Structure formats: structure tokens, C-alpha cells
Amino acid sequence: MNDSPDAGGSSRAGRRRVSVPVAAVVAILALEALALVGIAIGYAAQLGQPGPVGLPGRLFLLAVMLGAAAWQGWVGWSFAGGKAWTRAAIVVWQIFQIILAVPLISPANDGMTAAFGWALLVPAAAGILLVFSGSTMRHLAATEKLRRE
């Protein structure tokens, strides 16, 4: 950001408006992070239940879920800030979600499982498409250009 007085006399002169595709990608990432936190909370509530994995394994999985949610939130924040490295992180996460979603939308699954699969698939596909849109590419390129100057 450029807060110098010669930048138009306002500290807002250095700020850019965020385009709809950029805002949509940030919203998708935020919702995915919040959903993962919700899943982790539900998982934590069941830690005392018997199951095939011992408590240390369950605690590790809970830590992985919370770490992934924090990472997703950080990627969204950094993407909004125009950091170009976030494009790769976003694409990898969305592809991972698509890989998980495709078997769930099989006609052999019940309605809830298929609905969960679609809830994973649609935002992931939208995220991949939007992250390569023209305005998103300009958002990342403009920020990288400002950093080099």
C-alpha cells in the first residue's frame, strides 16, 4: 500500500478494489476453512467414543484438521493480499477436494452422501475456474509488480 501524501493526498489511493472473482475465491476459501473447523469440532466431540484408532491417533487427526483449516484461512488471506504463490496452494486444495468428492456423488450412495459430495465438488470446481480468470490473474500480477518496484 502507498500511504504517501503525493499519492493523491489520501491513504486510500494505494488500495485497489477487489474484483468479484477475487472476492469469490476468498469467500470459497473462507467457507472451506470454516467447514473444516466445524468438522474438527464435531470430530473432537466424539474423541471419547470407541473406535479402531487410539486416542493419540485421533488427537493427531484433529491437529491435522485444525492445521489444514488454519492453512486454508492463511491462503485465503494471502490471496486477498495478492500473493502469487497462493494460486498453486488453491489449485492443489481444490483438486484434493474434487478427488474426494467424485466417489461420493456416485448413484450408489445415499442422498446425504451425494449431497456432501456435491457440496465439495461445486465450490472446488468454481475455485479452480475463478483462480485462473483474467481479473484474478491481474490482481496477482499487479501486486507482484508493486512488490518489485
Image (tube, rainbow, N blue to C red):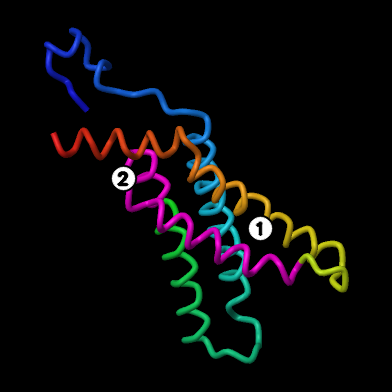
State which region is magenta.
75-104
Residue under the image location 45 percent in, 64 percent down: 68
Against 115, is 60 above or below? below
Name the residue that disc number 2 marks: 83
Q: CA distance from mark 2 to mark 1?
A: 25 Å
Residue 104 coordinates in the image, percent (x, y) = 75, 69
Amino acid type of disc 2?
Answer: Lys
Pointer 2 or 1: first along the chain: 2
Name the residue that disc number 1 marks: 120
Q: Main secondary structure of the magenta part?
A: helix
Check residue 20 for magenta coloring.
Answer: no
- Mark 2 element type: loop
- Callout 2–callout 1 Cβ contact below 8 Å: no
Residue under the image location 41 percent in, 51 percent down: 87
Against 49, is 148 above or below? above
Residue 119 coordinates in the image, percent (x, y) = 70, 54
Tell which of 10 and 147 is nearer to you: 147
Against 25, is 69 above or below? below
